[in-house]
């Protein structure tokens, strides 16, 4: 039997697709992570699935598109999307997000930024009053590999309490390599009072490719609740 969290993810994803998928969509973004699996599954059930192309946000996402019988396109071919769906690690009431728990934040942000509408799908654990409170692993930051020591020093000066170069763990000795051949830093700032400002400060550091702070990008967020209901946050 599916766990409560798994059921919550599925309910949120299905409802988000059912309520937002544009009838005449031509280009659709498919994000990364464990919740988006259900987005791809639901979109794969559409009878008109030969009439739109799906743009991935990384390797896993590309496989989801293929496995669900959807047409695969690239962001280079289709730089304007009708809609994008993606998960999140933390969402605040302004719909600002922390993303990058799955190390795909750069392509996720590229696809979301190119979409007319960006819909987030998540389970109840991602709802937060303030970014940095529930997702305590730190803000994921994609960096050019040889800049990690310098960027670590810079992040300390910006007030990070804990900074980790993300490791592959049992699966790899050494750091995680992103789909763009970069490294990832997780920088914990505690409660983030001004997420826009922090994003801008980090983005200016030489060596930083992109931050996992998604500011003013999401239009709606669907949360599967423990009760089996789905809560929708809008702007
Ligand atoms: C990957 C992401 C994911 O969308 C985020 O980690 C949420 O994943 P999940 O749906 O598995 O909780 O940002 O980089």
Image (spheres, helix red, strand yellow):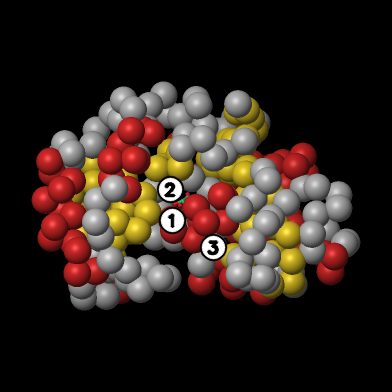
Q: Secondary structure at mark 3?
A: loop
Closer to the camera, 7 or 197? 197
Residues at marks 3 and 2, CA–CA distance in whole angstroms: 12 Å
| Residue 57: image tag | 3
Q: Position of residue 222 (x, y in %)?
A: 61, 37
Task: Name the residue carrying label 1.
Answer: 105
Residues at marks 3 and 1, CA–CA distance in whole angstroms: 8 Å
Asked whether mark 2 lies closer than 8 Å to ligand 1, one says: yes
Asked whether mark 1 lies closer than 8 Å to ligand 1, one says: yes
Q: Position of residue 98 (x, y in %)?
A: 41, 42
Query: In which quadrant of the rendered view does residue 106 lie?
Result: bottom left
In terms of sequence position, does the residue under pointer 3 or pointer 2 come before the other? 3
Above or below: residue 143 compared with residue 118: below
Closer to the camera, 150 or 45? 150
Query: In which quadrant of the rendered view does residue 224 lie?
Result: top right
| Residue 99: image tag | 2
Dots 2, 1 in contact, CB < 8 A = yes
* Left or right of 142 in this view: 5: right
Residues at marks 2 and 1, CA–CA distance in whole angstroms: 6 Å
In terms of sequence position, does the residue under pointer 2 or pointer 1 come before the other? 2
């Amino acid at each position: 039997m599916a766990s409560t969290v798994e059921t919550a993810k599925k309910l949120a994803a299905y409802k988000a697709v059912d309520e937002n998928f544009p009838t005449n969509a031509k280009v659709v973004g498919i994000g990364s992570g464990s919740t988006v699996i259900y987005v791809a599954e639901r979109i794969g059930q559409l009878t008109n699935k030969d009439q739109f192309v799906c743009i991935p946000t990384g390797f896993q996402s590309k496989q989801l598109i293929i496995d669900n019988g959807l047409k695969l396109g690239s962001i280079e071919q289709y730089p304007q999307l009708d809609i994008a769906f993606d998960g999140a690690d933390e969402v605040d009431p302004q719909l600002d997000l922390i993303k990058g728990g799955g190390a795909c934040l750069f392509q996720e942000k590229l696809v979301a930024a190119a979409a007319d509408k960006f819909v987030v799908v998540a389970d109840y654990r991602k709802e937060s009053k303030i970014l940095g409170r529930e997702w305590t692993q730190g803000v994921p930051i994609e960096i050019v590999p040889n800049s990690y020591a310098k960027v670590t020093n810079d992040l300390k000066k910006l007030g990070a309490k804990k900074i980790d170069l993300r490791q592959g763990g049992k699966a790899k000795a050494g750091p995680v390599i992103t789909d763009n051949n970069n490294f990832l830093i997780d920088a914990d700032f505690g409660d983030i009072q001004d997420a826009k400002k922090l994003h801008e400060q980090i983005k200016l550091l030489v060596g930083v490719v992109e931050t996992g702070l998604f500011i003013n990008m999401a239009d709606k967020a669907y949360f599967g609740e423990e009760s089996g209901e789905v809560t929708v946050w809008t702007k």
